[in-house]
Amino acid sequence: MTSLLSVQDLTVSYGRVEAVRGISLEVPEGGLVTLVGANGAGKSSVINAITGIVRPRAGRIAFRGADVTRTPAHTMVGRGVVQVPEGRQVLATLTIEENLQLGAWRSSGRRITEVYERFPVLAERRGLPAGSLSGGEQQMLAIGRALVAEPTLMLLDEPSMGLAPRVVDEVFAVIAQVRASGTTVLLVEQNARRALEAADYGYVLATGEIAHEGPATELLADDRVVQAYLGAE
Amino acid sequence: MQQLVNGLSIGSIYALFAIGFTLVFGILDRLNLAHPAVFAAAAFVGIELVTVAGLSIWLALPAVFVVGALLGLVIERVAFRPLKGRPDAHFAGLISSIALGGMLIALLQWRYHADTRRFPAESFPDTRFQLLGAQVTLLQAAILVISVLLMVALTWLVARTRLGRAMRAVAENPTAARVLGINVDRVTATTFALSSALGAVAGALFAMNVNSAQLGMGAAIELKGLAVIIVGGMGSLPGALVGGLALGLAEVFAVQYVGSSWRDLVAFGLLFLVLLVRPQGLFGARRVREV
């Protein structure tokens, strides 16, 4: 498989603090790759550098073979690289419908109907402020809003964070559907076991560096990874 | 009734001026204190367009709108954008916009000296008509209609259009707006352009209403504009409309029934009274910010 996204020697720093130190990763077309690690390992910084929300200090990011290292966020969305941000970031004072319309800022918006069919709760409440939704529903809205942008690559940042176990199941079911529909997924998760079970390939990030990488099944079977990052079951 | 007409006419100018203030504040959380300078500059530019270029007033007003929009782009680019990354960007922008406003006034002084300028007498038809016992000039009616139309159009734009949605998204959460692919810098610049365009039309209308334009006219309305947006509720468009009309009426009635030297005392006193009852302003909601 060819790489849809290729990251080489990426370094991200905030002032003097280096959050990401020279990491490289590949996301093949059609794949589901996960980036796991503890809180503060630099996972979000990697996603934000890829989508252009933060500027990397060094390294190269290529999407479909083209250099997009310094491409601004609004251009990346137009190219099909769409983020479901950490903490969902739904626009609470805007209606659900307006949130989805904004998701279609750089697309036709044809998919809004599909999103309503997939998430009937959003359709029922389309005229209400997004802030009135529960945490799980807001996560569905955040994913729906990204789908409306017609992504080639969807990057999800901690989609299970703060959600009840039953809702986490639902989120992972949706991610599996997104992938099955042909969208490539890069999933960042603190819930490493769940993420690796869903993914084909995984990277384990620790203090800004890649500690382990490999096919997800191998990482799940690797004692060092299990003990250090996944905990005993 | 006559006072009601006079008050609504001047009040609608206050509202139009204040709505530009409150638009930038509500969406970008920035106070643009170069706004009064735009108000003054627009009056002089409007007069120049009519007297020198010989434009009719109906063409001069749209031209003033465009000039105002361009000034807004300059203000955003020079006084606000370079400072946006600073932790004290709010305060820094306040100061730098005062400075830019001062430079704009200095340019006007260089071009027009300290003279008072007027629209030529024949530039607007002196038609009057009777309405419920009051004498209404065509100018007063035009000011009211133009101001209200512009404000309604702006409210519609913010509430119903794609650009308006993006403006509200930037207002609530700039990072989320970027994630969605919105070019936040462009939306910001557009907001400034709209705000200054409205302030510019207000300036030209004001100069027509009092039949003079002076360098200090911006400074005179600045405090009123700020009072209007505080009373209306910071960032609230309908609040600025109602607040502006209320201030205009309060001034006119104060002059009529109390005396002209009491105008500001009564008008601002009423505004304080409103704030005692509703500290968040007439239309201000207590804002809830999610972390």
Image (cartoon, coloured by chain):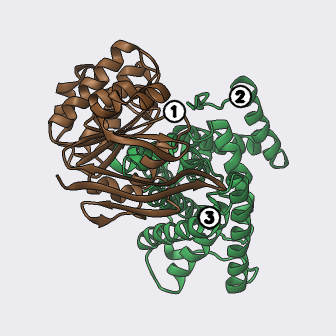
Chain colours: A brown, B green
**Sequence-earlier tag: 2 or 3:** 3
Residue B152 visible in the picture? no
Q: Which of marks 2 and 1 is in front?
A: 1
Q: Residue B279 carries which label?
A: 2
- Give the quarter of the figure containing the C terminus of chain A: top left
Q: What element carries label 3?
A: helix
Q: Residue A38 carries which label?
A: 1
Which residue occupies 55% across, 64% down?
A: B200
Q: What element carries label 2?
A: loop
Q: Is B79 left, or right, of A4 in this rendering?
A: right
Residue A180 visible in the picture? yes
- Amino acid carrying label 3: it is Phe
- Amino acid carrying label 1: it is Ala
Q: Are the residues at dot 1 and dot 3 in contact (C-beta closer than 8 Å)?
A: no
Compared to residue B211, the image places residue B245 above or below, namely: above
Could you say where residue A96 lies in the image, as x and y percent from the top left?
34, 30
Cα separation between marks 2 and 3: 28 Å
Which residue occupies 24% across, 54% down?
A: A4
- Subunit that carries the residue with mark 1: A
- Amino acid carrying label 2: it is Pro
Cα separation between marks 1 and 3: 55 Å
Which is more toward the observer, B148 or B127?
B148
Could you say where residue A159 lies in the image, as x and y percent from the top left?
39, 30
Q: Give the labeled residue for mark 3.
A: B39
Q: Which of marks 1 and 3 is in front?
A: 1
Compared to residue A9, the image places residue A132 above or below, namely: above
